[in-house]
Image (cartoon, rainbow, N blue to C red):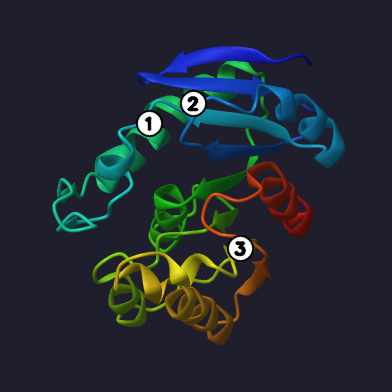
Amino acid sequence: MKKTSIEAGGLHCLCCGAPGRRIAYVLYPVDSLQGWIEAAAARYGTTIVVITGMDWESVFSPWPAPGVPEGSPDFRGESPQFLKLLQDTVLPQVECALGMPADVERTLVGVSMSGLFVLWQWMLCDTFRSVASLSGSFWYEGFVEWMAARPVPRKSGKAFFLLGDRESRKGGKIFSTVGVNTQHVVDLLRDAGIDAIFRSVPGNHFSDPVPRLDAAFQALG
């Protein structure tokens, strides 16, 4: 199947189908994966949908928090509304348009703030069987404490985490916690019996975006 574009819920969805019932949604900051998606769908035997057009800091923040670095707009905490939009509007429209079967098996992939979102929603629901968080924003105020204070639900899928080895050196005290916090959330999942994979790779927050996506799809199988 060739690339196709679908507008759903005010979002732009770049899609490329593959045989079978597996579909992976990638919450991406920019519409720049046109050259990757077709080869990736064929390589991994998975229908891939890259979703762009979100208000990045708003919809991926699970609760309101002060903006970072200091002076930035505050996070508005609109993840609950965005999750509902995905569940009620975006996924049904996309999967109907692509002719996906009723027993579809979903994966959700996120980067940076959307990498935080994918784990937050996985703790709350089973819409997605597996998740991948690339450079997830686990420095977010209160997130590690929120995870530690609640039981980790049983999951049949996998969780993949990737972090650049220079990301904890990013300017600002709060960003420096991302390495320790990422390892902590991985440990919490593993302690609960979740198949959680963590990979440290060379580079900073913005290094090698396509190889990192490929690493996630390879790990999740």
Q: Residue at x 53, y 25 (%)?
A: 31
Looking at the picture, does residue 39 appear above or below residue 202? above
- Which x, y percent locates residue 54? 36, 31
Q: Tag 2's secondary structure?
A: helix
Circle nearer the viewer, 3 or 1? 3
| Along the line of sight, the residue nearer the viewer: 187 or 137 | 137
Q: Which residue is denoted by mark 1 in the rendering?
A: 88
For the residue carrying disc 1, how many other residues have a C-alpha within 10 Å: few (<14), some (14-19), or many (20+)? Answer: few
Label 2 is placed on what type of residue? Pro
Separation of marks 3 and 2 at Cα, in angstroms = 29 Å
Q: Percent x, y for residue 180?
A: 46, 81
Residue under numbered circle 3: 162
Which disc number belongs to residue 92? Answer: 2
Q: What residue do we see at 50% from left, 37% from top? A: 28
Residue 140's place in the image compared with 6, above or below, is below
Mark 1 and 2 residues: CB-CB less than 8 Å, in contact? yes
Look at 55% across and 59% down and name the residue there. Answer: 204
